[in-house]
Image (cartoon, rainbow, N blue to C red):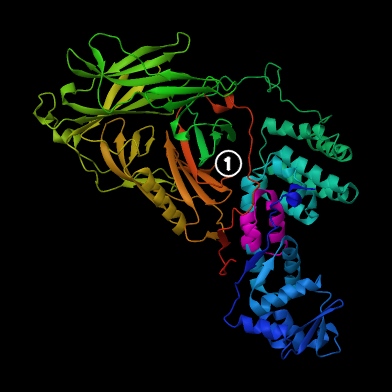
Amino acid sequence: MSDFDSSPECCFGKPYGSHENSLPYDTCLTSILKDSFLCDLIVRVGNDTRPAHRIILSAASSFFRELLKDKKLLGQESESEVDLTSVFIEARNLDDILTYIYSGHLTLTKTSVQALLQVNKVLKMPALDNQCAQFLLINLRPVNCLQTWETAWKYNLQELFNISLIVCRETLCDLLLINDCIVNLSDAFISEFVANEEVMTTMKPDSVVHMLLRWTSAQPIARKNKMQKFLSLLDVYLEWKTLSEIEFKSIPLTISRCSDEFPEMTDYIGSWLMNRYNVKSIQPLLPKTDDGETSENSNNSDLSHHQNWSLLVAEKDCRTVGIYCNTKSKWFTMDLQDSIFKTLGFINDHVVLERKSNTLFLKNVSTMTSWTLSSPIYNTRGIEKCPGAYETTFFLHLNNIYSVDALINVDSMDLLCLLNRWDHEGQCWKFVLHLTPEILYNDVQSISLKVDTSNGDIVYLFLTVKLTPDTRQSTRFNPQPDEYDTCESSAPGSSGNPAITIGEKPPSVCMKPLEMFYVYQINMKDYTHQQIAKRRCEPAILSTNRKIILDDKILFFLDPNPEIERQFRHAFYYKNDCFLNCLSLGLKDGNWANMSLRVPLPNIRDISIKKRDCACFDSFVTACKNLLFVGTHWSPHVFQVIMYDISNLTISVLPAIPLPAIRQMAIFALHAHQPISDILTEEIRTVDLLNFHFKDWSLLSWQGTFS
């Protein structure tokens, strides 16, 4: 027995009541039906009969209206009786229909919903279809999304069809493909499923083959004749899906593994595969490298770490984290005990997380061992750490861990920023370079540091110094207003691509005279550095606001992250472009300019459902390097991440995340680290098999109430 049938909380196991068509006088109608008062029609189903009223049935159904207008359509001799045995499967289905027509109340179960949809193909009552579709939506979950999709496709329930297709695309995995629900699908729907490019592009080819093998094996004699049709569809699928070498070899590998379970069908598909690709056997195909070794044993050492980034996605109160690696364009999962926002990156088989008290926590993802790394300790005479609200800043670049500290030269009272690198072999911090802002320590009240990496060898250090009230009397602090306070308007950006544009914006930045902000550019290859800009205040609150690092400029978002997320929610709701206020720093001339970033929405299929008493979706924003990520939680199981490449002005939607996406979501982008694919080797998709995640949701056309 399948999980679908045996689950104690079966997805269609609980009755569902609705009062969509309830009227103030429904009790009266139910009473006169129960008492057979003024009934002028007898409806027969087999040996069972039920009394009814012609005018009420005609008002509820166009089928009854046409039938009772011309009784000869069914060859009935008696004017007071109609035989609908050919329409209703069982007498209890007639009871359900009469109860619904007279009272507006309908109780649905797993068995009755299919029967009523079949009956309604004849009765043609749109409201009844809507009732059944709402019931199926409430009980939708990954383990039955294919069955629900088939039901919506079979009975033309368009809104349910759309959401079922999207949930299937977002959650379909090997765990669901081996479920017994696959074998119960009709051959007509299997053809529709395999031909659906939107879903099939998200599936691995070997999973498609395994699914076809499992479906055919349930009735090998009857379904073998259908295989040729499915293989022709699979042939089309392999034509428009660009397969990597690993994906290509996975198809015969799957067939080989399934040879014991489905011997007859694997031979059949194996023959087709050999003809399709002109190969001599169905042994796993391992592409050869230049030195004759298989690619499975070769190591891609030329992988650029500069272009590497990863995106972390997690559910609230859940330890499992989805990690997207851009070098492999796929998701991985792992258990992370801390918040994703504390993650610095991955290096030498370790995940690196920030902890309080100026320490790092490193966990080996292979051996599950862990250790802590403290910030540098300075024993040099005359050099002390700055007191006050200040912490060491850590960052990763390539395979190294770096720290940045703000220190005091006691003799000269100069402020120093020291960059150190962790020596893995010597197990100690080593000095790399120091920066000296033009500020006396006596003028300093507090300091904050922030480091961001680019797509190359350049790292940017952002230093914010809060000054004491009497700083303006200092001889070292005498800035010229034109040097620090001017904000030039930029000309509207034009790149030939209207997708994302950068245009001018009136100045809106409030200067703070008791704060200085410095931007330093550090080349991590030779550790040369230069100050590229300074101004009288932070362009944005660096601890809460995002920034984008381009080749020629840095964009500081003026609005904090919660406000940007609110703007995206508004844009998704009204289907408008999102405009983000930015302050731009030119990296060549050091000039500041206010800008407006127009961010259009991608072409995403509308989800035809709504949530009661609140918004149907939520948005989450993060950024790294030249990329802006927007995660949108449309509904349970449907969380899509949109990636905006600000450098190339392009938009793309990442593949479905490997998490159930039931709880509140969070996303976080990592700047620079060892490629995650060098550490984790398996992609595991987890799905939540519990039901009633859609209990607070309804179809857009639904106007009823719940009971």
As drawn, 436 above or below 186: above
The C terminus appears in which quarter of the rendering?
Answer: bottom right
What secondary structure is the magenta-colored segment mainly? Answer: helix
The percent coordinates of residue 220 (x first, y second) are 88, 46
What residue would you read off at disc 1?
Answer: 657
As drawn, 373 above or below 495: above
Return the residue nearer the eye: 286 or 616.
616
Q: Is residue 679 left or right of residue 526?
A: right
Return the residue nearer the eye: 99 or 315.
99
Q: Is residue 315 left or right of residue 158?
A: left
Amino acid identity at mark 1: Ile
As drawn, 130 above or below 273: below
The image quadrant of residue 126 is: bottom right
Q: Is residue 70 left or right of residue 313?
A: right
**How many marks are shown on the rendered structure?**
1
Q: Which residues are magenta?
A: 135-164
The percent coordinates of residue 106 (x first, y second) are 67, 70
